[in-house]
Amino acid sequence: MMDTLLLSRIQFGANISFHILFPTITIALGWVLLFFKLRFNRTGDMRWMEAYRFWVKVFALSFAMGVVSGITMSFQFGTNWPGFMEHVGNIAGPLLAYEILTAFFLEAAFLGIMLFGFRRVPGWLHTLATFLVAFGTTMSAFWILVLNSWMHTPAGFELRDGVAFATDWWAVVFNPSMPYRLVHMLLASGLTVAFLIAGLSALRWLFGDRSGEVRTTLRFGLTMGAVLIPLQILAGDMHGLNTLEHQPAKVAAMEGNWETRGNVPLLLFAVPDEETRSNSFEIGVPNAASLVLTHKADGIVPGLNDFVTEDGEVLHPPVAPVFYAFRIMVGTGMAMLVLSWGAMALMARRGEGVGTWAQTRRGVDGLPKLLLIALVAMTFAGWLATLSGWYVTEIGRQPWLVTGVLTTEMAVADVPSGLVLSTLIAYLAVYAGLTLAYIGVLVHLARKAAKGQPPAEPRKAPSAVVGGLHAAE
Amino acid sequence: MLTLFGDPEVWLPLAFAGLMGFSILVYVVLDGFDLGVGLLAPLVDDAERDRMVASIGPFWDANETWLVLAIGLLLVAFPEAHGMILSGLYLPVAIMLIGLILRGVAFEFRVKAPAGQKANWDRAFFAGSLMTSLSQGFMLGMYITGLEWTLATLLFSTITAVFLTVGYSFIGATWLIYKTDDDLQRKAVDWARGGIWGLLGGVAAISIASPLASERIFERWFGFPEILLLAPLPLTFAAIAGVLVYMLRKLPAEGDAFAIVPFAATVLLFALAFAGLAYSFYPFVVPDRLTLYEAAAAPESLLIILVGAVVVIPIIIAYSALAYTVFRGKATDLTYY
């Protein structure tokens, strides 16, 4: 039977993987909803309100999933990882407390008003509630990423008898990797939501929905994706350079580079093997890794073999999962780039008729069916990229829980492995069921919305569609 | 500032114990009625169930957050106790968490999933509420008896599990008396009339069993002069319980007068029972093993949290009050617009 450490890691990994799916959606979707609401306030155009009404349901469901799975983790610190708080509780404690105090209550209390208060409160208060919920989710992301970044690049503390004490809270909060990680995660949330909106809107389109609302959200999702993806590539690159400076072993695993050397190729594919400490089936671009990481073709890239002590103790992370997860993340990002920019180009083409480009561009009608199907397939691409990115950074931190301070092994609880296994199985069953139910409900909401909308033919002018929706109220 | 109130190694842990106790009490009351409504939900038809859910829909999320705060305070202020208590209660904690997950998502799924699945999510709503209530009651019993797994403590904890579930159902019923009208309100009064004896019986049983189970609690209660100091507590409890029993016979009253009284009285009963428990355990945070003062985190860290808590908790209470004001009055169907 597997040992308690491994099972506890799998259990926490499963919980946090399931949890992160939903905040990844709510963080950015909150701001998107605020945008929809503000557009409606400004223009009075019902398309924005319709979009708000559809997506607030997705938000409510995602929020509930995020809350309940988040509670699980606050307990698991105690049930499975008591050593974490014993050693670094003086740092982690205040950060978690501030997350609860400044974020959790804010979002939870105003969520009720945001969801159900539209007719009960003045318009400004409803808009304010939407803002505060979005703000709360982002604050929550801020505090938890501060803590997570501190675990990667701890700063502003001293150790007394193995227990960390804060000496400089400013340095704790603004630790070296925090700004990069925060930006990278917020952009990941934005991209996840962009492709979720584009994907579900494309699904509604394929179901025959040609409403003004679905046109708006489809274009909105694609534009958001097209704008954010280059920013994310830039932010990811900077985060990688930051990691190279502070956690070189992680970068060595990401690149699958065993020996410290110059002229390192960028491996598109390989099978890393820790037994032989080498790769097989390498396909690489010569010198590209050196170029990306050091901006010089012959730049020195750290190798994994530097992180093995003379008596054979391995102080670098397991290579294969980090190596593969990194490629899945980057590959998904590239697919996002191609798809969103391709869609933008297709939408920008001139259609028939006379007039300026703005009047005749084909817009969402210019999107071929195949591309819409691809968008549906990419609905949850943000999840895939976010999860694999988290696996890169979290597995990449091993064997440390807090780099240089606390190993994962030191923190685990002395709970019988059979007990951990049984709860692990129970959690996995619940999470798998709920993830399926969640996706099922999103598809159901899309189908239901498509049914209630004007059919594909004959096409109406946008103003007539808006008028028609008004009449249907 | 650290020495403003005397020795920080004394007053800081005490302040945090107070904050944590406050959070637990608020959680037990607020999520208590949410869970109670969930426990009672199978007793009515679909339309009435929608109204029951509507009576807690805008609040449950914030209510549950008090549990996160309570456990968060335990985690940050008494890290050693957090590990000791939660790893000692590994299994009931896991069951509670799965219950909380089911209950929380069922709120959303039951109205958003295809109509054919609603009944299943209603079952999940009930099952989640039941799992949560039973496991919390079980943990209460294990905590009282010192977190040891023996036949006697298991038996005691099973009893507390049942009675806490009854208690939650009861406060849920009183909440429904306050938030609903007509048939559903009359049903809620009926449930409460039955449930009150379960609640009082439970408090009595736990009050009798606790001093028998723990010598220290026996000393605290029946030693002299403690017994004189403690006496007002059960007397007040009995007086309020009397009012409650009387009111439940009279309700529903003309013009819906006094509909809030049973709920308010139940909140007081919960607070008194909680005060009794807190009194019994002070100064231990893990009964008979670890005191507040031994378990507390570093004063510097505690102070930073305390400053935040003192500033933010009043604000939290203010906007929670706003939410309850916005959704005051009888529950109506929840709509997104």
Image (cartoon, rainbow, N blue to C red):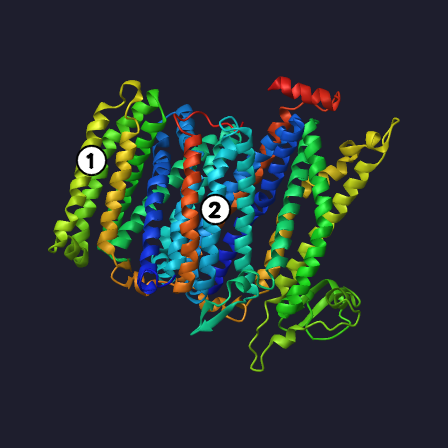
Query: Depth check: A103 or A455 in front?
Result: A103
Question: Left or right: where does residue A368 sit relative to residue B93?
Answer: right
| Residue where numbered disc 2 is placed | A104
Quarter of the N terminus of chain B within the rendering: bottom left
Question: At which x and y percent is residue A342?
Answer: 79, 43
10 Å crowding of disc 1: few (<14), some (14-19), many (20+): many
**Residue type highlighted by circle 2:** Phe
Residue A458 visible in the snapshot: yes
Q: Residue at x 31, y 57 (%)?
A: B14
Q: Residue B154's spot in the image, x, y percent? A: 26, 52
**Image quadrant containing the C terminus of chain B:** top right
Instruction: Name the element at disc 2.
Output: helix
Q: Which residue is mark 1?
A: B241
| Host chain of mark 1 | B
Mark 1 lies on a secondary structure that is helix
Asked if badge 1 and badge 2 are on a common chain, one would say no
Left or right: A241, with B265 as reference point = right
- Rendering coords of residue B58 (x, y %): 45, 34
Q: Residues within 10 Å of mark 2 (few under 14, many from 20)?
A: many
Q: Is residue A2 visible to us here? A: no
Residue drawn at (15%, 50%) of the image: B229
* For residue B166, side relative to residue A419 (left or right): left
Q: To which quarter of the image does residue A207 belong?
A: top right
Give the residue displayed 17% in from the left and 55% down from the top.
B220
The residue nearer to you, when weighing A231 against A370, is A231
* Chain designation of label 2: A
Q: Residue furthest left?
A: B224
The residue lying at 59 percent from left, 20 percent from top is: A473
The span from disc 1 to disc 2 (Cα, nearest Å) is: 35 Å
| Vertical order, A123 against B301 (above or below) | above
